Image: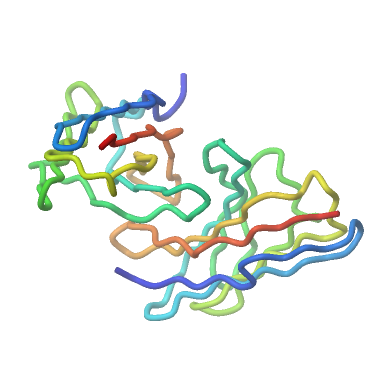
């Protein structure tokens, strides 16, 4: 299957700092990428849909000014968690969509905000 | 009503057993259907797409019932390594709307 990388895999930061997470499709071009968040023992929650060259579409309840998404190329989308707080600690996962509608997920980024 | 519903389980089955999961969806215009598996603290991985005619991959069989609006996943001869959470995903016919089930937990017991 297609390969999606995500970096960093784990980050610990102080409250109030910003964290940038990168999602790359390694062997294909993805016009659409998705960002999810998953809390322990809960299901995936879609945060936003990232479209190359245009603004991201955010799900209800997700603050676009706090979770900045940039999809500047067909192989890279970034999520920046601005002014992170302990309640932002979670597992953040990106996925890239093929034309067949299959989604391939990155390995995830575990964020811990102290 | 949720777009996609799954029985969360847990399903605890002995090795070698056959186990089946169902997933119902509410939008009759849904077009694409998938099963993913997610291991603890890992990302979901595509298990198989679900085609109208049904499809099989080794011990795994997926079926779609449009009339009753559900998809199913059958696992035969369960292995310990099949222990995971199985997610169904449904996409509507237009746009980027994907709907994830909450997942069904499977534990295969020696």
Depth check: A94 or A59 in front?
A94
Q: Quadrant of the C terminus of chain B?
A: top left
Decide: is A3 above or below A102: below
Q: Quadrant of residue A76?
A: bottom right
- Residue farthest along the top direction in this orientation: B1
Quick check: can you spot residue B12? yes
Q: Is residue A17 left or right of residue B85?
A: right
Decide: is B77 above or below B65: below
Decide: is A49 above or below B15: below
Percent position of residue B8, x then y: 41, 26
Q: Is residue A113 left or right of residue A1?
A: right
Q: Measuring 12% from the left and 39% from the top, which residue is drawn there?
A: B76
Decide: is B107 above or below A58: above
- Residue farthest along the right direction in this orientation: A16
Q: Quadrant of residue A13?
A: bottom right
Depth check: B14 or A73 in front?
B14
Percent position of residue A51, x then y: 54, 65
Q: Is residue A48 left or right of residue B23?
A: right
Q: Measuring 42% from the left and 50% from the top, which residue is drawn there?
A: B95
Q: Measuring 77% from the left and 63% from the top, which residue is drawn there?
A: A12
Marks counted in the figure total: 0
Depth check: A33 or A4 in front?
A4
Q: Measuring 73% from the left and 62% from the top, which residue is drawn there?
A: A68
Quick check: can you spot residue B32? no
Percent position of residue A37, x then y: 61, 48
Percent position of residue A102, x then y: 33, 57
User: What colouring method underlies this structural image?
Assistant: rainbow
């Amino acid at each position: 299957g297609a390969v999606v990388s995500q970096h960093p895999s784990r980050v610990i930061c102080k409250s109030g700092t910003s964290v940038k997470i990168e999602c790359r499709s390694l062997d294909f071009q993805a016009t659409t990428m998705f960002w999810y968040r998953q809390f322990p023992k809960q299901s995936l929650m879609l945060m936003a849909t990232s479209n190359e060259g245009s603004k991201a579409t955010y799900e209800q309840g997700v603050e676009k000014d706090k979770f900045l998404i940039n999809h500047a190329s067909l192989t890279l989308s970034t999520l920046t968690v601005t002014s992170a707080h302990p309640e932002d600690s979670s597992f953040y996962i990106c996925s890239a969509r093929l034309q067949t509608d299959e989604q391939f997920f990155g390995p995830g980024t575990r964020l811990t905000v102290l | 009503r949720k777009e996609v519903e799954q029985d969360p389980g847990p399903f605890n089955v002995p090795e070698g057993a056959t186990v089946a999961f169902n997933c119902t969806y509410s939008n009759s215009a849904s077009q694409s259907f998938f099963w993913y598996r997610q291991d603890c603290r890992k990302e979901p991985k595509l298990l198989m797409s679900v085609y109208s005619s049904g499809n099989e991959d080794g011990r795994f069989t997926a079926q779609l019932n449009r009339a009753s609006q559900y998809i199913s996943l059958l696992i035969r001869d369960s292995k310990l390594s099949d222990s995971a959470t199985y997610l169904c995903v449904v996409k509507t016919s237009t746009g980027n709307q994907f709907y994830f089930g909450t997942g069904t937990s499977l534990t295969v017991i020696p």
